Amino acid sequence: MKSYAIYDEELDETFAIGYLFYYEKSKSFVIELSADLDEWDAPLLFQRLVREKKYTVPRDISLLWVKERVIPSGRQNIGSILKNHKLKDYSEMALLSLSKGRCSQDNCYITEISEEKIPENIKDRMKKNLWECFPTEDNQIVCLFKDDIVKKVEISLLLEQYKDILYVLKNRTLLDSVKVGAGGYSIIFNDSIEIQTSDLRRIGQTLPLTSKDFYNFVRRNVLDTTKTCDMLQCSRQNLSYLVKEKKIKPIIYGTKENLYLKGEIEKTLND
């Protein structure tokens, strides 16, 4: 993750109006605005959010802010521009860095900062993001948040806000594709349908468990092939035979190794 402070030349030069985070693997942008930012001092794109006291800018709106400040990929002479700046490929982040985030529509600019310089209140806000998630058999999503809260979310309650959820509810494969978005700001189905973390937290039912409880369960109760063989006191060949004969069922099939549930192996030993 790369971090940038966003400043406005017309405001106090020591006051960052927000922070831009770039997640390199997914090439995603997310902006966290300062809670001290006044609606009328905010860039036009963010004024409604500030008015509603929403300071985490969704990924799509953050990308719009970035696109306002970079040369579009469809520019006729884009190849020459990239060559002049010694860029092999089109990169919004690279172009944004070259211009320091400046554009003709406002007086904002960006400055790269280290993670240590991100304010604690922004870090605390980010701790409410997702750590992990998984679907349940009844078409709900269990969400494990970074602040150790666990919620079970009935996503059908968000149909009015996210129309595409209907496709998710009708397609189990699509539901099973769920994963945590960049920075834990959302969940994403099939890399296309996205639900914001703030909405998941808002409607989710809190469970009397913590994220650490799930971590400890996996650490203590999920076995790899080697540990399973040790527990059964058998060879890998014998274990493969037991799996083939359906006397043992892995919870995950892998190309080189499977994963097994400890309770299932103990049951096999006692049968």
Image: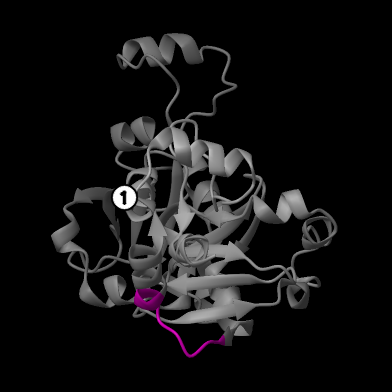
Report x, y in % for residue 257.
43, 38
How many numbered markers are drawn?
A: 1
Secondary structure beneath dot 1 equals: helix
Return the residue nearer the eye: 101 or 143. 143
Report x, y in % for residue 12.
22, 69
Residue found farthest to the bottom: 208
Return the residue nearer the eye: 152 or 161. 152
Q: Is residue 222 above or below residue 203?
A: above
Side of 179 relative to 225 (left or right): right
What's the residue at 83%, 61% (across, down)?
166
Q: Is residue 194 visible?
A: yes
What's the residue at 47%, 41% (across, down)?
239
What's the residue at 77%, 62% (across, down)?
165
Q: Is residue 270 above or below residue 9?
A: below
Return the residue nearer the eye: 211 or 51. 211
- Identify residue type, mark 1: Asp
The residue tagged 1 is 230
Return the residue nearer the eye: 217 or 151. 217
Report x, y in % for residue 168.
77, 57
Viewport quadrant of the C terminus: bottom right
**Is residue 212 one of those drawn in magenta?**
yes
Are there few (<14), some (14-19), or many (20+) residues within 10 Å of tag 1? few
Report x, y in % for residue 79.
47, 10
**Is residue 243 one of those drawn in magenta?**
no
Residues rendered magenta in the picture = 206-213
Q: Is residue 104 visible?
A: no
